[in-house]
Image: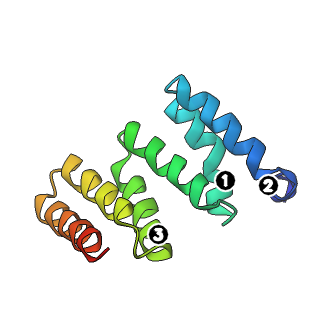
């Protein structure tokens, strides 16, 4: 309950600025610890999800990154970047077939534009 109050009172702009500062120092675990509660509460914008997904990836938490990029690709289905990021996660896990499918989807979206 106390965490819910803190999440609701925190300005996302400040939160993301703090995450960006941590990103400059490649402090991926700290970014994850900072943003995960907001993600779990459904309180992150697209930009927040992008930072969290990138942090999971850099920390080699590929399954968590996959979940984030799947969510982003559903929220913005015409954004090729999310499929590309998803493909990268699959490739990092050596799930080559899923990586190929995601890369192809990214290319398909790019070629439609």
> Image quarter for residue 84?
bottom left
Q: Position of residue 23 (x, y in %)?
A: 54, 31
Mark closest to the chain's N terminus, 2 or 3: 2
Mark closest to the chain's N terminus, 1 or 3: 1
Q: Position of residue 29 (x, y in %)?
A: 52, 34
Determine the secondary structure under disc 1. Answer: helix
Q: CA distance from mark 1 to mark 3?
A: 16 Å
Residue 37's tag is 1
For mark 3, what is the residue? Answer: 71
Determine the secondary structure under disc 3. Answer: helix
Quadrant placement of the C terminus: bottom left
Q: CA distance from mark 2 to mark 3?
A: 21 Å
Residue at x-position 75% and y-position 51%: 12
- The 10 Å Cα crowd at callout 2, few under 14, some 14 to 19, many 20 or more, is some
Are dots 2 and 1 in contact, CB under 8 Å? Answer: yes
Name the side, left or right, on which 73 lies relative to 33: left
Residue 75's tag is none
Residue at x-position 82% and y-position 50%: 11
Q: CA distance from mark 2 to mark 1?
A: 8 Å
Mark closest to the chain's N terminus, 2 or 1: 2
Depth check, front residue: 6 or 69: 69
Quadrant placement of the N terminus: bottom right
> Image quarter for residue 90?
bottom left
Name the side, left or right, on which 81 lies relative to 51: left
> In this picture, is 82 found above or below 2?
below
Depth check, front residue: 106 or 7: 106
- Residue depth check, mark 2 versus mark 3: number of the one nearer the observer: 3
Depth check, front residue: 56 or 49: 49
- The 10 Å Cα crowd at callout 3, few under 14, some 14 to 19, many 20 or more, is some
Residue at x-position 56% and y-position 42%: 32
For mark 2, what is the residue? Answer: 7
């Amino acid at each position: 309950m106390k965490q819910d109050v803190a999440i609701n009172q925190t300005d996302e702009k400040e939160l993301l600025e703090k995450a960006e500062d941590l990103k400059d120092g490649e402090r991926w675990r700290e970014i994850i610890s900072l943003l995960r509660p907001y993600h779990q509460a459904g309180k992150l914008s697209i930009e927040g999800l992008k930072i969290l997904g990138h942090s999971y990836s850099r920390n080699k938490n590929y399954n968590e990154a996959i979940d984030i990029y799947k969510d982003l690709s559903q929220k913005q289905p015409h954004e090729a970047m999310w499929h590309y990021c998803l493909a990268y996660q699959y490739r990092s896990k050596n799930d080559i077939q899923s990586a190929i499918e995601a890369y192809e989807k990214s290319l398909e979206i790019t070629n439609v534009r």
